[in-house]
Structures are given as C-alpha cells and as structure tokens.
C-alpha cells in the first residue's frame, strides 16, 4: 500500500552508486536528494519477504540489475528505520522528523521513500551516513 509508514524495527536498503563510495565507505553524497525528487529512494527489506539478510540482499541485487546499470564498486547501505529517524531528530539543527513510507512501484514492490529531506541538505545526508549498519556489493 502506497504511503504506509515503515515500522521503526524494520530496515531499508539504499543503492549507492560508485561515485558515492570512497575506499569502500559510503559518503554522505549517497543520501542527497536530487533537485526534482520528493524523497530519497530506498527499498524496504522486510517487504521483500525473504528470510535473512543474505537473501534480502540477493533479491535487491537482482532488482537493481533489472532497473539500473550497476557499477562494480556500487554498494547497498542498510539502515534501521528507527535508528535513522532518532539520529536525525536528535542531531539535526531543526529536530527534523523524517517519514519513511512504502512507495511500491509496478516493478519494485519494496520501493520506499525517506521524506522531509530538502534538496541539497548536507547535514541530514551526513547524519544518515553515520547510521549505516551494513554495506553490501550492489552487483551480484
């Protein structure tokens, strides 16, 4: 269902293109909203209906291979929804309350968005980068 809030206990994955990966580390640039975007695109891992992180990541790799031109250095950043929301609310200058909503697409039922990040907001992007739990290769 579009617009459904993703529970704080759940996780999202963010595709991070090669230009946002430096020495294997994902930079804040991976979490910047582009000018024409309403939200930062992510994938709701629990919506993939796969058991375990390895199978969730494998499913995302397959999904990305169908939708994107996945570079060899590209990564998947895994974030806990509650940890992400708490960090940004606690440490952003305006106590920003992010909304992470399910935004399924016809070819991507796990698609979701992180809302309330304005274009070019480096502070929030940096805070998000600080709560990355895991990184995985984006290419299988």
Image (spheres, rainbow, N blue to C red):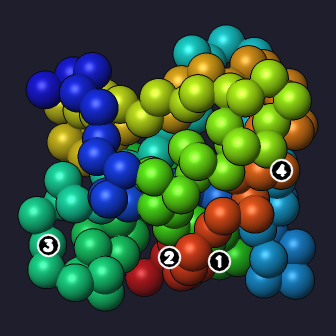
Circle 3 residue:
50
Q: Mark 2 and mark 1 in contact (Cβ < 8 Å)?
A: yes
Q: CA distance from mark 1 to mark 2?
A: 6 Å
Q: Residues within 10 Å of mark 2 (few under 14, many from 20)?
A: some
Looking at the rendered image, the disc whose residue lies closer to the viewer, 1 or 4, is 4
Name the quarter where the C terminus is drawn.
bottom left
The residue labelled by disc 1 is: 72
Q: Is residue 63 visible?
A: no
State the SS at label 4. helix
Residue 26, position as x, y percentages in the image: 76, 68
Closest to the camera, between mark 1 and mark 3, is 3
Q: Report, in whole angstroms, how far the alpha carbon at label 2 lies from the one at label 4.
A: 24 Å
Spatial CA span between label 1 and label 4? 24 Å
43 lies above or below 70? above
Residue position marked by numbered label 2 in the rendering: 139
Q: Quadrant of the N terminus?
A: top left
Q: Position of residue 60 (x, y in %)?
A: 35, 65
Q: Earlier in the sequence, mark 1 or mark 4?
A: 1
Residue name at image x 70 percent, y 76 percent:
73
């Amino acid at each position: 269902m579009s617009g459904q809030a993703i529970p704080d206990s759940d996780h999202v994955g963010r595709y991070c293109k090669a230009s946002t990966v430096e020495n294997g580390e994902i930079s804040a640039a991976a979490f910047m909203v582009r000018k024409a975007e309403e939200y930062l695109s992510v994938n709701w891992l629990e919506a993939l209906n796969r058991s375990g992180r390895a199978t969730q990541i494998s499913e995302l790799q397959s999904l990305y291979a169908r939708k994107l031109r996945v570079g060899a250095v590209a990564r998947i950043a895994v974030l806990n929804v509650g940890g992400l929301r708490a960090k940004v609310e606690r440490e952003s200058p305006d106590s920003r309350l992010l909304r992470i909503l399910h935004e399924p697409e016809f070819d991507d039922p796990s698609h979701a968005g992180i809302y309330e990040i304005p274009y070019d907001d480096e502070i929030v992007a940096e805070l998000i980068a600080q709560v990355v739990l895991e990184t995985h290769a984006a290419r299988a």
